[in-house]
Amino acid sequence: DVKVTQSSRYLVKRTGEKVFLECVQDMDHENMFWYRQDPGLGLRLIYFSYDVKMKEKGDIPEGYSVSREKKERFSLILESASTNQTSMYLCASSLSRNSNQPQHFGDGTRLSIL
Amino acid sequence: GESVGLHLPTLSVQEGDNSIINCAYSNSASDYFIWYKQESGKGPQFIIDIRSNMDKRQGQRVTVLLNKTVKHLSLQIAATQPGDSAVYFCAEHNTNAGKSTFGDGTTLTVKP
């Protein structure tokens, strides 16, 4: 089974801090994704990546950046955290861009910005 | 823009009954559709999928129906059990764009 591991289940940071959320997958998937999940808004795509060093903006990229230096690892960066970035963050991976395969999700990081 | 909508935010059923969860999508270019289940404290998990060249697919106790004419997707769960209580998301996928768009979710509650 594919395992997607997010480094922290809960994280508390302060406004203005630079925050790193880490995600690792163990099935050699090409695609990786970062979403945030908020009540009533479903899952919204922040950034995604098809390959090492490649990144694409999702629907809500403002205030975020990403890094994919290794195939198995996809990091989400909050450059200067703000309270409206308090949310549940979900990482996912899938096999490859042109294959119709479902995404595999981690269990999420609940981030609070004070 | 693209959007995927679920008809009901909540659904309550009796244990043993069949459940039907509906979803509307708007992007005609979507060619792959997925249902996910999210239990409390966990990430979404894949349940069943269907490609746009099909209109029905069955799994164990679950069936997905796709009506491309009206852009409608449904998930049917047979003999619903308490363990089926969760939030269910539909997602539409556009292979050219390489990304999925998720609906807002339906919370299914199974009463014993």
Image (tube, grey):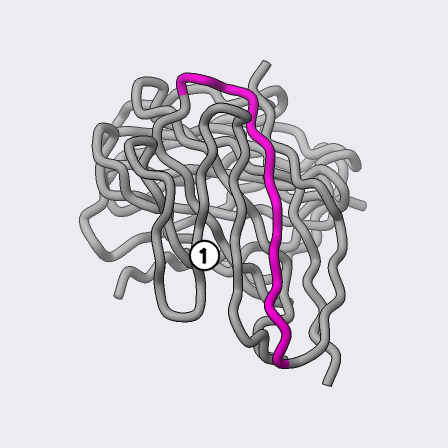
The residue wearing badge 1 is A106
In this view of the protein, which residue sits in the foreground, B56 or A36? B56
The amino acid beneath tag 1 is Gly
**Chain of the residue displaying label 1:** A
Which residue is at a point 53% across and 46% down the rendered structure image? B74
Residue B60 horizontal/vertical position (percent)? 37, 69
Secondary structure type for disc 1: loop
Circle 1 residues within 10 Å: few <14, some 14–19, many ≥20: many
| Vertical position of residue B38 compared to residue B26: above or below | below
Q: Which residues are magenta?
A: B16-29
Q: Is residue B79 left or right of residue A80?
A: left
Residue beneath the point at 40% across and 50% down: A23
Query: Left or right: where does residue B55 sit relative to residue A41?
Result: left
- Residue B105 magenta-highlighted: no
Measured as percent of width and height from the top left, residue B14 is found at: 72, 76
Position of the N terminus of chain A, as image quadrant, is bottom left
Q: Residue furthest left?
A: A28
Q: Would residue B22 be counted in the magenta stretch?
A: yes
Residue lying farthest to the top in this orientation: B1
- Of residues A98 and A54, the one nearer the viewer is A98
Q: At 52% from the left edge and 40% from the top edge, which residue is drawn?
A: B73
Q: Relative to B5, is A46 on the left or the right?
A: left
The residue depicted at 38 percent of the width and 32 percent of the height is A67
Q: Nearer the viewer, residue B47 or A20?
A: B47
